[in-house]
């Protein structure tokens, strides 16, 4: 391979390698975030469900009182 071609290819290959490493790092971080969100979601599930049932109960009562 001619020296001038090697000199042109080297920065390009370094750029592409850096870009790929950045993409992998971001994918790992996104996966960690997703796992954290799922864990928090599971921990808060009972609170969320309790809130929904309470909201539905209040909605039902308000509809019953409006019907009377």
Image: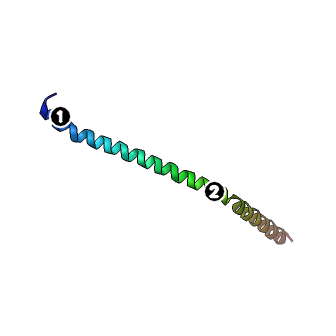
Earlier in the chain: of badge 2 and badge 1, it is 1
Q: Is residue 6 above or below residue 67?
A: above
Q: Residue at x 81, y 71 (%)?
A: 66
Q: Which residue is mark 1?
A: 6
Cα–Cα span, label 2 and label 1: 52 Å
Classify the position of the N terminus by image quarter.
top left
Q: Residue at x 47, y 51 (%)?
A: 29
The location of residue 30, given as percent across then percent down, is 49, 50
Q: Is residue 60 above or below residue 18?
A: below
Q: Is residue 46 left or right of residue 33?
A: right
The residue located at (41%, 44%) in the rendering is: 24
Circle 2 sits in a helix, a strand or a loop, which is it? helix
x, y percentage for residue 41?
63, 56
The 10 Å Cα crowd at callout 1, few under 14, some 14 to 19, many 20 or more, is: few
* SS type, badge 1: helix
Closer to the observer: label 2 or label 1?
1
Q: Which of the 4 image quarters holds residue 44? A: bottom right
The residue labelled by disc 2 is 41
Quadrant of residue 39 in the image?
bottom right
Which corner quadrant holds the C terminus? bottom right
Return the x and y of residue 45 as percentages of the image width and height: 69, 58
């Amino acid at each position: 391979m001619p020296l001038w071609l090697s000199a042109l290819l080297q920065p390009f290959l370094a750029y592409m390698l850096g870009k790929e490493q950045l993409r992998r790092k971001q994918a790992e971080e996104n996966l960690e975030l997703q796992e954290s969100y799922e864990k928090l979601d599971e921990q808060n599930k009972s609170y969320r469900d309790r809130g929904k049932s309470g909201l539905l109960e209040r909605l039902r009562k308000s509809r019953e009182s409006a019907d009377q």
